Image: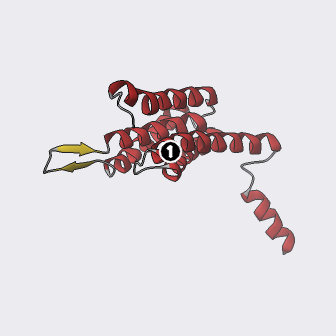
Amino acid sequence: MWDRIAATVSEEFSDAPDLEQVTRILVRLLLAALVGGVLGYEREHHGHAAGLRTHMLVAMGAALFVMVPDLAGMEVADLSRVIQGVVAGIGFLCAGAIVKTSSAQRVHGLTTAAGIWMTAAIGVACGLGREATAVLAAALALVVLGLLPRVVDPRPR
């Protein structure tokens, strides 16, 4: 009986059969968490609603959604539908970050929503094993979030 239980548990963990696969999974998820965290820290540091944890979870979730079918050998055409689902789902999350105030006719949260959307895209890149693309995209996103506000509004913050 115990042999059957051990064999069943071992079979359940068969998606990571060797050290290479475990390393691949860890690198992709840890990088997604790291770059998502960097973007989230920048937002949280400036007092915006979606911060460190939100961005980390969005990036890791997006990475996981595409990594599992990719590593399982899903065809590219089918994987594109998974990515479409991730993008649509993140769109709903982003919509919750946008608020329009009726008194001043102002919209708040557009940059936060766009940042979450970008973080999901970076997570997808991590999940697909496109680590260099993910790091470069995160660096450019940091430029947009961190430096461009100073160019547009040069007053001290």
In this picture, residue 127 sits left or right of residue 23: left
In terms of depth relative to the viewer, which is nearer, 44 or 27? Answer: 44
Q: Quadrant of residue 3?
A: bottom right
Residue in the image at 81% along x and 63% along y: 7
Amino acid type indicated by mark 1: Gly
Residue located 63% across and 33% down the image:
129
Classify residue 133 as left or right of residue 157.
right
| SS at circle 1 | helix
**Residue that mark 1 sits on:** 40
- Taking the view exactly as shown, the residue that stands out farthest to the bottom is 1
Residue at figure coordinates x 50%, y 26% from the top left: 140
> In this orientation, does residue 72 appear?
no
List x then y, in percent, for residue 29. 64, 44
Please state if 108 lies on the left or on the right of 17 as rendered: left
Q: Quadrant of the N terminus?
A: bottom right
Q: Is residue 82 visible?
A: yes
| Residue 15 screen position, x and y as percent | 71, 49
Does 67 sit above or below residue 137?
A: below
- Quarter containing the C terminus: top left
User: Relative to the observer, which residue lies in front, 153 or 85?
Assistant: 153
User: Residue 55, relative to residue 143: is it above or below?
Assistant: below
Q: Position of residue 94 (x, y in %)?
A: 36, 46
The residue drawn where x is 35% and y is 31% is 155
Q: Residues within 10 Å of mark 1 (few under 14, many from 20)?
A: many
In which quadrant of the rendered view does residue 127 lie?
Answer: top right
Quadrant in the rendering for residue 9? bottom right
Q: Tell me how the rendering is colored.
A: secondary structure
